[in-house]
């Protein structure tokens, strides 16, 4: 007797639901930037600064007092620098209309030399009634300048609120870091998993702290050298440009390109001859080439090396989500994600894309097609 046919299995919708959930989560994170950005920045700073609090605790300093000392030291190193840069930034903002006018004059000279981009001719004398032909490029720049002014004023207040919230949250996280990690480890049922969780947290703390310290020292050195070079070239506000260089170099690939464009505009607005106009940008290109190809590989080392593709994609993704703040935290988040992948067996493929140090040469595709599939090796980080 034939058994009744089994009902047809419903189509799989798991991947579609996961994709919809991921897209909804991404846009939710993008809209929640004012709330989530201070929290995430405070968590990353806690991972980097908590070893100092633990070191003070081993010397008899309570965590509450140690966290306060670390936060005060951090503020003492950043607030005076910001106050020092406030005066040249204000001076640059006051001269911004003149600078824009000079840029437009230089732009007219460049457009006159390019066929098809000639600016409209000025009105002929004696025909005052005839209206001058509007220049769409200048009108667009003027409207963008007004929008930029409003955006800067709005973002300044938002930045002040976010900065205050980040500092307060950082203090509370540093003061309670040991308690939070203890509760997380205690909530894990298996003893081996507890060791993996604690080891992952400590490894992320070491690697993020080491990266921030090394890259911070290198970028500050580059900023100081760049400020001295621009001062010798006679560029106005060299201290401000040195600080901009140091901050933007924290963003891989995109940051140096932005510094090059800004220095080119500064050279156009400050100098007349071609060599002087290109001098600031070329000086940064030379200095950045030495730093990225010689200094950073020697100091950072292979332990913190990441795949260039993963770094670029992370910077693009977080920059699209949260702007400059997202681009600045893109690499520390990538380091933390790699620490998780090293201890999770199911994320070993993602770890291969994140790793930047490949000492062994990749086999050829033909040999992989002929070779029988290798047995998966036991991951010492797996649960």
Image (cartoon, rainbow, N blue to C red):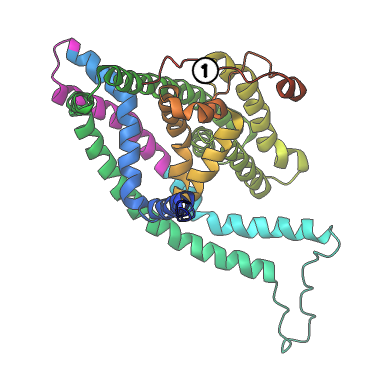
Q: Is residue 212 above or below residue 149?
A: above
> Where residue 44 appears, x then y in whole percent?
35, 32
Left or right, residue 91 beside residue 266: left
Residue at x 26%, y 38% (from the top left corner): 167
> Where residue 125 appears, x then y in whole percent?
79, 81
> Where residue 339 appears, x then y in whole percent?
42, 24
For label 1, count other residues whose C-alpha is less than 10 Å away and answer few (under 14), some (14-19) or many (20+): some
Residue at x 67%, y 37% (from the top left corner): 281
Q: Residue furthest front?
A: 1
The residue that label 1 is drawn on is 300
Q: Quadrant of residue 366?
A: top right
Q: Which residues are magenta?
A: 58-86
How many marks do you count on the picture?
Answer: 1
129 and 54: which is toward the camera = 54
Left or right, residue 155 beside residue 191: right
Q: Quadrant of the C terminus?
A: top left
Q: Is residue 314 above or below residue 10?
A: above
């Amino acid at each position: 007797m034939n058994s009744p046919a089994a009902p047809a299995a419903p189509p799989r919708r798991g991947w579609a639901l996961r994709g919809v959930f991921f897209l909804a989560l991404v846009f939710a994170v993008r809209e929640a930037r004012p709330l989530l950005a201070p929290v995430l920045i405070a968590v990353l700073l806690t991972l980097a600064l908590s070893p100092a609090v633990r070191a003070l605790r081993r010397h008899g300093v309570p965590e509450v007092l140690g966290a306060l000392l670390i936060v005060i030291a951090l503020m003492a190193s950043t607030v005076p620098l910001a106050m020092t840069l406030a005066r040249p930034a204000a001076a640059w903002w006051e001269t911004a209309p003149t600078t824009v006018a000079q840029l437009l004059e230089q732009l007219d000279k460049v457009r006159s030399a390019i066929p098809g981009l000639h600016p409209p001719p000025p009105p002929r004398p004696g025909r005052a009634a005839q209206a001058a032909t509007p220049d769409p490029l200048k009108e667009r720049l003027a409207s963008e300048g007004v929008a930029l002014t409003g955006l800067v004023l709005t973002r300044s207040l938002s930045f002040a609120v976010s900065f205050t919230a980040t500092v307060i949250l950082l203090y509370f996280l540093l003061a309670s870091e040991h308690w939070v990690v203890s509760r997380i480890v205690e909530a894990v049922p298996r003893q081996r998993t507890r060791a993996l969780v604690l080891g992952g947290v400590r490894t992320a703390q070491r690697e993020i702290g080491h990266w921030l310290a090394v890259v911070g020292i290198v970028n500050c050195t580059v900023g100081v050298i760049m400020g001295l070079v621009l001062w010798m070239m006679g560029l106005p506000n060299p201290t401000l440009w040195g600080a901009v260089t140091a901050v933007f170099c924290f963003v891989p690939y995109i940051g140096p390109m932005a510094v090059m464009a800004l220095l080119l505009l500064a050279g156009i607005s400050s100098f007349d001859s071609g060599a002087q106009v290109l001098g600031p940008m070329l000086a940064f290109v030379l200095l950045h080439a030495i730093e990225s190809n010689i200094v950073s590989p020697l100091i950072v080392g292979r332990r913190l090396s990441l795949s260039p593709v993963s770094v670029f994609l992370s910077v693009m993704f977080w920059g699209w989500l949260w702007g400059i703040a997202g681009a600045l935290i893109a690499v520390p988040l990538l380091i933390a994600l790699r620490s998780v992948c090293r201890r999770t067996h199911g994320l070993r493929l993602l770890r291969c894309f994140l790793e930047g140090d490949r000492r062994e040469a990749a086999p050829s595709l033909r040999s992989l097609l002929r070779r029988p599939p290798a047995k998966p090796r036991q991951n010492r980080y797996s649960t």
